[in-house]
Image (tube, rainbow, N blue to C red):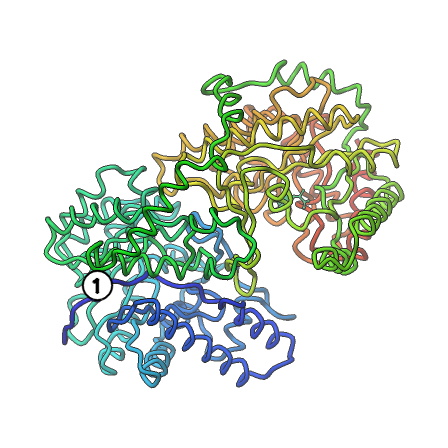
Amino acid sequence: MTTTNFPKATIEGYPRVGANRELKRALESYWAGRIDAETFESAAHSLRLDTYNRLRDLGLTEDYAIPADVAYYDQVLETALTVGAVAGETLDDEFTLARGNKDTAPLEMTKWFDTNYHYIVPEIADDQDFKAHPQRVIKLVEEARAAGHTVRPYLVGPVTLLALSKQAEGATKSPLDRLDDAVKAYQEVLAELNKSGVKWVQLAEPALVADLTVANDEELAAHTKRAYEAILAADNRPQVYLTTPYGSARKGLEVLAELKPEAVQVDLSVGTLALDEGYLERVKNLKSHVVAGLIDGRNVWAANLRDLRSKYEDLEGSLDSLSVSTSVSLQHVPHTVEAETKLPADVATWFSFANEKVKEVVALSQGPLEAPEAYSISDRAVRTRAESERIHNAAVKARIEKLPAGEVKREPAFAERNEAQKELGLPQLPTTTIGSFPQTKEIRQARAAHRKGELSDADYNAALKDEVKSVIELQERLGLDVLVHGEPERNDMVQYFAELLDGFVTTENGWVQSYGSRCTRPPIVVGDISRPAAMTTEWSKYAQSLSEHHVKGMLTGPVTILAWSFVRDDVHQSVSADQLGVALADEVHDLEETGIDIIQIDEPALRELLPLREEDRKAYLDWAVRSFRLVALEAKPTTQIHTHLCYSEFGQIIDAVAGLDADVTSIEAARSRMELLEDIDETFHSEIGPGIYDIHSPRVPSVAEMAELIRAALKHVPVERLWVNPDCGLKTRGYEETEASLRNMVLARDEVRDSL
Ligand code: GLN
Ligand code: ZN
């Protein structure tokens, strides 16, 4: 092993999609057959070199400072292909694994730790060969070298890769049982990198910061010991830079102190240190070169460089050698604040996106004497932000202070409300939908034209009203019981509210990769949140005026709004959650005033923010549940409050779901064939609508199939408490299949009801 120093400043990773979403365009053009593989590869190649050049210009000038964390679709899939955890040679193999094709289902996709990024879940069969494909990484190294860059190859480490993988159907071994096989493949890749002269390789092991269902902290630490004893024992390898982003390592950190990989990155962001106060001290036990992940890669706030520099100096006093990095990959933040032309001038200086964070890393490693300007910019941002009226709203604070602390509870209790709500006159096994109806090309075009100023407010609203009218007519034709207005006015269920609430800003170009070519533009919570005016009443009132049936009001809950936004770092998230809770409570009140008596508060992201560590979960669920209850707190007993959850398995948090104390809970269940009902015990007292058709595919489920699912649900839920609805909103579907599916859904309900 030949050695060289680790760079003084680096980053864990960088956004891959490109400042102008070049990769997204290239991917989608290739998938649509508009460009060939060669053109695609060449676009991706230029993008990579542009990125390396930019990172060098931003200050990552040392060898190995730039990570080559390249992936066309996803970093986990990329590593899985490199070490043969899944089989695939070509570009098309890779995309088939990620997206499926007409004969093959895609691999599953799920959340990457507690972020909004989704990774592809490798499925590992007993006979999976773990055949190494080192060329995938070597190619990147050589391409960069030819352009004058000495980059650092990036792989997800073996423990994390297997811990996040799934046992293939019929396999007898769990993925972690295959650790030794995987390690051999990593060794081969490392040996090839060594041969080609690479001196540092990055192995990301974020599993070390989580309590996973497949393995707890102790077990993951033991796997790490086993894997890295083998990897580090080899001499024909580059130096190993092991990273532990997304939280604090516990048992794993002790193991790393024994193993002594050549360099270790630790997440020392303010958020991580708040959850684990002793972490900074424990990190001092490491015997490796330590890379302090001080710059927070998960939020968009300019760093307090002086504060961070003092942490750096504290570490410097106790450790032999130290560098600076980001806490996590910058893939979770947009490219650059420079692309934002419409941010208020004061606000713009408070932000730091990927490029700005790279500069912060460099300035932090240099110190205030060498980089005085960066420190004075940071000082100013910290000061103006702390003093800004935009952030501190006395009226909001006063209102929150008046709230009771701890648990809040809607009165009267469910049983009495349920009785009162009989006056709604709903039939047995009522049918409804989750809110959105297909967002047609016409709606999207109208929205785009309106945004560009080509369509007047009046014309845009008229177009949306036409849509609401046709959605109401369709539901009446189909014979649904509780109608919705269809949400055509919402570009996105979070952004819509963020644009109407005070305390948020939205960006023009703040795109962040969600998965594959899909990007979102999360709003940013900058300060205290309040509601200047009603947000949804006009639409609900109009829809209700068109029908004798009940029309459901439709709100996004506090937790989901926060989960899909960038949050404040100057207050605990629960503060913003309370503020959203009361702002939305005002909306509930206004909806009631306009005659709406069924209101749904969507919380699809409730599970998403669940802390990675077991011991942090209760505190989270307490404030999350409280914020939801605040929304419904003052609702009339006769107002039926619904909630909706999806995207995950709820077993783990079923008590919290019950704790929301909604009158009706609709929940995704079709794909797992109602498995979740097993989790619903006596504590779950509300009415419930387990989704009976999967809206993620255009397939039209048959009447028989849905009737069977209703019957399955009736085994667990008494008929007076069961609702019939799809799994989720219909926004991404087309009208043709939606109409056919909903017709079958109503027929299935009729069939079951007739047979009771
Ligand atoms: N009401 C929303 C819709 O139907 C809910 C979406 C969601 O749960 N993700 O689109
Ligand atoms: Zn949903």
**Residue 546 appears at what percent x and percent y?**
88, 37
Determine which residue is flagged by label 1: 8
Q: Nearer the viewer, residue 150 or 92?
A: 150
Locate ligand 2 by image quadrant: top right
- Residue 9: image location, x then y, percent: 25, 62
In the displayed structure, 152 sits above or below 438; it is: below
In this rendering, position of residue 340 left or right of residue 353: right
Q: Is residue 501 visible?
A: yes
Say which of 743 and 754 sits in front. Answer: 743
Circle 1 residues within 10 Å: few <14, some 14–19, many ≥20? many
Q: Where is residue 318 in the image (x, y as percent from the top left)?
A: 10, 49
User: Is 516 above or below relative to 381?
Assistant: below
In the rendered view of the protein, which quadrant contains the C terminus?
Answer: top right
When asked about the image quadrant of residue 543, the answer is top right
Left or right of 404 on screen, residue 287: left
Name the secondary structure under disc 1. loop
Q: Where is residue 755 in the image (x, y as percent from the top left)?
A: 81, 34
Which residue is at a point 76% across and 26% down the rendered structure image?
597
Q: Residue at x 35, y 50 (%)?
A: 296
- Identify the image quadrant of residue 530: top right
Mark 1 sits near ligand 1, with its Cβ under 8 Å away: no
Q: How many marks?
A: 1
**Can residue 669 be spotted in the picture?**
no
Picture quarter with the N terminus = bottom left
Looking at the rendered structure, the kind of residue marked 1 is Lys
Relative horizontal placement of residue 387, taking residue 558 as reference (left or right): left
